[in-house]
Amino acid sequence: RKEVEQDPGPFNVPEGATVAFNCTYSNSASQSFFWYRQDCRKEPKLLMSVYSSGNEDGRFTAQLNRASQYISLLIRDSKLSDSATYLCVVNPMNTGFQKLVFGTGTRLLVSP
Amino acid sequence: DAGVTQSPTHLIKTRGQQVTLRCSPKSGHDTVSWYQQALGQGPQFIFQYYEEEERQRGNFPDRFSGHQFPNYSSELNVNALLLGDSALYLCASSAPGTSGRETQYFGPGTRLLVL
């Protein structure tokens, strides 16, 4: 079983749509969680950290369910510029060291 | 303020050769991590350097080695290249801290093609 699993997509949505991505992780001791965004042939960039209480940043909302080992990302009012691959990322280390484990990514295509 | 920089941007090698990739971290960052990203996959952790020592390592063979210099820059060396080593090699740096939540900032990567 992969440490971090995501639906690879692609998700094809029209502008203005709401889209949700899900991710599961296998290591129950994982301490920190992130969503990164990666544009085609570019480096990953941090979109947002994910906190136990859930957190929101503009049109983006992230949720964490530790009991189910499940992370989600909700994008509201999709823009053309949201087209990218969204990587679910987990730090399984509980020592303070950061070793990021990435899912394969979910590709989002937003069309006019 | 320059971000993470990597060189070269692209590289073509043949099987059996050796390669060295370089990374300069973001200003103020002391920790450098290296990742390998194969086509269609997420990045995979190779190792992390802090205070010039390797402190964490992923599931990569000993052909992959690294070094960190006193100015925090880092090198990734791969010996006896295989076709399967063709990938995007990403360097990420992070600021001092032990919470595990420090943001890792990625460089643009080096695209390695092994023929």
Image: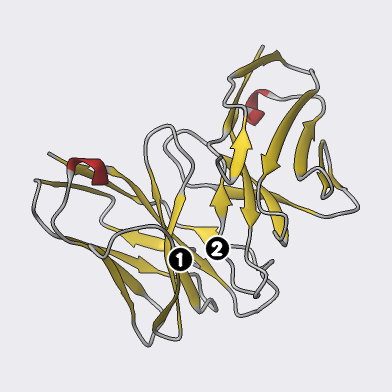
Task: Work out which quarter of the rendered image holds the C terminus of chain B and state it.
Answer: top left
Badge 2 is on which residue? Answer: A99
Q: In the figure, residue B17 lies in which quadrant?
A: bottom left
Q: Tags 2 and 1 in contact by the CB under 8 Å rule? A: yes
The residue sitting at the right extreme is A53
Badge 1 is on which residue? Answer: B33
Q: Amino acid at mark 2?
A: Lys
Question: Judging from the image, what secondary structure is the residue with disc 2 in?
Answer: loop
Q: Compared with residue A26, is residue A18 higher up or lower down, i.e. above or below?
A: above
Q: Compared with residue A16, is residue A6 higher up or lower down, i.e. above or below?
A: below
- Taking the spot 65% from the left edge, 79% from the top edge, the residue there is B97
Q: In the figure, residue B53 lies in which quadrant?
A: bottom left
- Taking the spot 45% from the left edge, 51% from the top edge, the residue there is B44
Question: Judging from the image, what secondary structure is the residue with disc 1 in?
Answer: strand
Q: Is residue A9 left or right of residue B20?
A: right
Q: Amino acid at mark 1?
A: Ser
Q: Position of residue A84 (x, y in %)?
A: 57, 31
Q: Position of residue B93 (x, y in %)?
A: 50, 67
Q: Chain of mark 2?
A: A
Disc 2 to disc 1, C-alpha distance: 8 Å
